[in-house]
Image (spheres, rainbow, N blue to C red):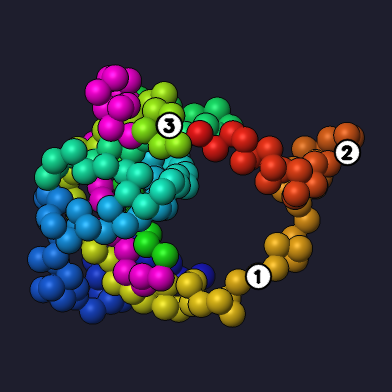
Amino acid sequence: MPSINTVEELRAAYKPATERALKKQLAHIDRHCRSFIGLSPYVVICTSDPKGHLDASPRGGAPGFCKVADDHTVLLPDRPGNNRLDSFHNIIQTGQVGMLFFVPGVDEMLRINGTAELRTDEELRAQCIEQGKPPEVVVSVKVRDAYLHCAKAIMRARLWKPESQVPRTILPSLGEMIRDQTGGATEAETQAQMVERYKAQLY
């Protein structure tokens, strides 16, 4: 099966990037990026370990839960999760992170790449209080690249269209799926039970 194995082969298969696509990449947070982050309740962070094993992790909160500390720094508060800490292990080992910000109803996205460190400063934690609770850890991201991503992917997915939503009952509950994957013998938690448990653990 034919495959692409060199950058030259890759570039030969595509048209050149437009001047606008290249020039839109910034090395700082401008007013448009700042507004986008302030409206975003959801971001996916991507990290890698030293061997190049990648991980993507979703993070959410009230719109603007990520804070722009200055034109070169974004603060991402951590909230209770499953304590695997995959992203944090990777950040400690490589210090590299990518971020993809979403705003519901907006088809464009914001991409940020940079270096990250895990901070526990009381001052930074106090900037990220939500529901009366500060995070245990704040990810401080120094921005290397910041640029708006075009709408085509979300337009193709029709992500924000009401008719694209799928009834939750189309899949088993998460408890049932994990029980099947792990071979657990205990009774699986229902979706309703899981939602109620999560509500008590969000912050």
Q: Residue 187 carries which label?
A: 2
Amino acid at the residue labelled 2: Glu
In the foreground, 154 or 167:
167
Disc 3 target residue: 132
As drawn, is 196 to the left or to the right of 77?
Answer: right
Q: In this view, does 108 lie above or below 178?
A: below
Of residues 18 and 24, the one nearer the viewer is 24
Q: In which quarter of the image is residue 2?
A: bottom left
Instruction: Mark 2: give few (<14), some (14-19) or many (20+) Cα within 10 Å.
Output: few
In percent of width and height, residue 193 lies at: 76, 43
Check disc 3 and give the amino acid type.
Answer: Gly
Compared to residue 121, the image places residue 54 above or below, namely below
Residue 174, position in %: x, y?
72, 48
Residue 105 appears in view: yes
Distance between the alpha carbons at the discs numbered 2 and 3: 35 Å
Magenta highlight range? 105-128
Q: Earlier in the sequence, mark 1 or mark 2?
A: 1
Which structural element holds mark 3? loop
Q: Is residue 56 visible?
A: no
Residue 79, magenta (yes or no)? no
Q: Do the residues labelled 1 and 2 touch (CB within 8 Å)?
A: no
Residue tagged 1: 166
Residue drawn where x is 39% and y is 45% of the image? 46
User: Which label sits in the foreground, 2 or 3?
Assistant: 3
Mark 1 closeness class: few <14, some 14–19, many ≥20 residues within 10 Å:
few
Amino acid tagged 1: Val
Label 1 vs label 2: CA separation? 26 Å
Mark 1 → mark 3, Cα distance in angstroms: 33 Å
Residue 118 falls inside the magenta stretch? yes
